[in-house]
Image (cartoon, rainbow, N blue to C red):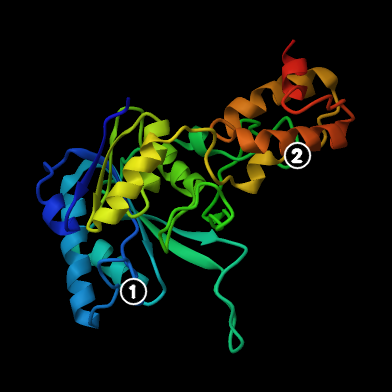
Amino acid sequence: MTDINIITGDAVEQLQKIDALSVDLVIADPPYNLGKDYGNNHDIKGFEEYLSFSRDWLREARRVLTLAGTLYVFMGFRFISYLYDILDRELQMFFNSWIVWHYTQGMGRTRGFSPRHDDILMFTKSKTAKFNLDAVRVPQKYYRDRNNMRGANPGDVWGFSHVHYCNGNRQKHPTQKPEGLIERMVLASSEEGDLVVDPFSGSGTTLRVCQQLNRRAIGIEINPDYITMTRERLGAAFSAFDSVDPRMERVPRDLRRPDVREDYLKKHKEWFLTHHENAVKKFEDSVSSMYGIPNREPSRQLTLLEE
């Protein structure tokens, strides 16, 4: 089993116990300071107190990262510009991307526009940080000889649905993140066997993803109830990640030549739908509709092409 550890405690105190230059990737979803109830603590601090807390854990996150390491941090609108400033000017990390996670459902408003996104800052320890583009490409819209049919760069706007309450993987946590969202970060910025740290482990999504992608991981969580939840989640049977970028199910148009089409379709599942078996049926139906290939039964269409 992959080496996955979860530690009960304060993020700053536990990060201080990790050796410098030992972590390949940090994925952090800290409290946004919006007053949410996390069971044994509330997400509410004074403005300067919250900035001081942010400086403390960000400083430790930078310290533990290898020179090729990367930090992804989720943050709400009120403080994200301050975190950017801390990372850029105070800690002198290298800005890579300001990622927008777009979701289709969110808080409703009657005065003003309803929020439909979260922001994610991506900073690296050096200019030579790991980035595995081929691992996170998305299918092309059209087949063209000049296109890289291994796929396109997913860009900095990521569309993943929330983990809705009807989803079997939904945990009792107010800010659970989709597994497909975390999967993209882990694949892009680490290799198998690398060490990933989540200083605010929450419902355990990062640890679950690392478990399935053969990464070592350390999760730090202050609420013992969430520790118990995470251990149960890690021990549960795995079938597929609970979310997928809808573009992964996309079938390129203009695959007119049968030999080219069959070669591509055989590769699509491996390239884009590994760990997303729950999306294969929709992809197969799209292939059948677009190219008239009989879809005899679920999960048989790609098998037929391989025979």
Pick the front one: 78 or 205? 205
The residue drawn where x is 28% and y is 49% is: 227
Structural crowding at the residue carrying mark 2, measured as other residues with C-alpha within 10 Å and reported as few (<14), some (14–19) or many (≥20): some
- Find residue 71 and report its horizontal and vertical position in percent: 31, 51
Location of residue 143 (image quadrant)? top right
- State left or right for residue 297 relative to residue 267: right
Kindly give the residue lying farthest to the right in the view shown: 292
From the image, tell me which residue sits under label 2: 142
- x and y, in percent, of residue 140 in the image: 68, 39
Q: Give the answer, above or below, for where 32 lies relative to 129.
A: below
The residue carrying mark 1 is: 79
| Amino acid type, label 1 | Phe
Percent coordinates x, y for residue 255 in the rendering: 81, 30
Residue 136's place in the image compared with 51, above or below, is above
Task: Find residue 74 and report its image quarter.
Answer: bottom left
**Which residue type carries mark 2?**
Tyr
Cα distance in 3D space between marks 2 and 1: 40 Å
One can see residue 131 in this view: no
- Locate residue 172 relative to residue 127 in the image: left or right: right
Query: How many numbered dots are placed on residues in this image?
Result: 2
